[in-house]
Amino acid sequence: MRFGFTEEQQEFRADVRQALRSAEVRAAVADATAADGVEPDVRPLYRLLGKHGLLAVHWPAEFGGAGRPLTDAAIVAEELVRAGVPDTLHVNTIQIVGQFLLMAGSAEQKRRHLPALARGERFASVLYTEPDAGSDLGALRAVAEQDGDGYRITGTKVFSLKTRFVDYGLCAARTTPDVGKYQGISLFLVDLGAPGVTVTVIGGVSDEQFHRVDLDAVPVSGEDLIGQRDQGWPLLNEALAIERTGLDYYLKAERWLDAALEALVDREPDSPHDAYLEQIGRWDGVLAADHALAWEVLTGLAADRVDQVAAAVAKYHSSELAQSIAAWAADIPGPEQRANSTRAAVTLDSAYREAPGLTLSAGTSEVMLQIIAAAFDSIGQERR
């Protein structure tokens, strides 16, 4: 377990912060901030960040990166959020889909897709969940039928984010039916501009909108099959472990706790503060532990270790923590702050509406506990 950053990492963090403080970046961040319930198009901001080389610093230079360690990419992710950059496109495009291509894609797939992702010219989303296949992806029904050298994918995917702004979807589909729940699944990178793709908005209370993606015999080249045919289940588990570092949830929790403190400072002088301040101190201590959990997973990934149990622990703890902070802090802004739509009040209102989904996305808390319990049960059996 690591509890600190090296001098080199601290210097790199300072350089990233300096780049994000430029007038050009700050203006682009302001333009990408949601207002009046309208979800903004943040792609211009990401193209600017791509020009600064900040989107995929850990990728090899030949794929648009700077060849830095994965841990430096995590430092960038932290500073992007702290600078006010909306992070969903970065999480989906770089941290999940791009990282998955880097680990499991062919040399040609990496060459064809990664540089444009690193430059902020192309974006990706995750198409796993279906109306009847959420936490248990073994229940997915989307099918990919062979069509010459390629495939045609038919099915429905739900609850993806930013999908109307992206170019590709990392899609799970069945290539061989009737061979078992976890067999016959393959992964594809689907062009969401292809014929047969329909993207619609799913109504919800969060500022970020979920989407439904209907795939009607969508043509996919055989060159966009990721890994081997019918071997998608092990890749899915690896991809989900990459997704479950907990860092993105930690950063939400940190931002929401900062907003709670800001709202508390702005409250009327005669309002009670002591109990809130005590709890903020407690939350801050838990946040420090959560940060350590996330970085333990990240350090493992940087050493090419995919620890599904550690990832489940980090995801469970961070999502539950962020959700708890959002619920606790919802009542801190006073009537005057709400009436004037202060920054803290707006942030905490948004957090309250977003938080319920955190313990569902990337695997429910119940599934995370199941993974953890199964690991402990296995250890117990080995010791008997």
Image (spheres, rainbow, N blue to C red):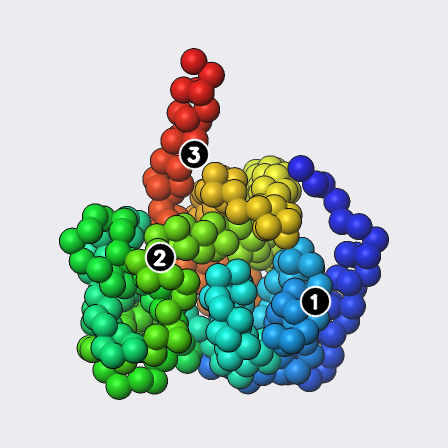
Residue 361 seen from this side: no
* Of marks 2 and 1, the one in the foreground: 2
Q: Residues within 10 Å of mark 2 (few under 14, many from 20)?
A: many
- Where, quadrant-wise, is the C terminus in this rendering? top left
Residue plotted at (26% across, 56% down): 184
Give the label on residue 148, or none.
none
Q: Secondary structure at mark 3?
A: helix
Instruction: Kindly identify which residue carries mark 3.
Output: 372
Q: Distance of mark 3 from mark 1, alpha carbons?
A: 33 Å
* Of marks 3 and 2, the one in the foreground: 2
Residue 136 seen from this side: yes
The type of residue carrying mark 3 is Ile
Image position, residue 296 (x, y; %): 61, 43
The type of residue carrying mark 1 is Gly
- Where, quadrant-wise, is the N terminus in this rendering? top right
The type of residue carrying mark 2 is Gly
Dot 3 or dot 1, earlier in sequence: 1
Residue plotted at (71% across, 41% down): 3
In this view, the residue farthest toward the left is 178
Task: Tell me if label 3 and label 2 are in contact, CB under 8 Å.
Answer: no
Image position, residue 179 (x, y; %): 20, 51
Image position, residue 351 (x, y; %): 46, 58
Q: Secondary structure at mark 1?
A: loop
Dot 3 or dot 2, earlier in sequence: 2
Q: Nearer the viewer, residue 338 or 150?
A: 150
Dot 2 or dot 1, earlier in sequence: 1
Residue plotted at (22% across, 48% down): 181
Q: Nearer the viewer, residue 260 or 307?
A: 307
Give the label on residue 67, or none.
1
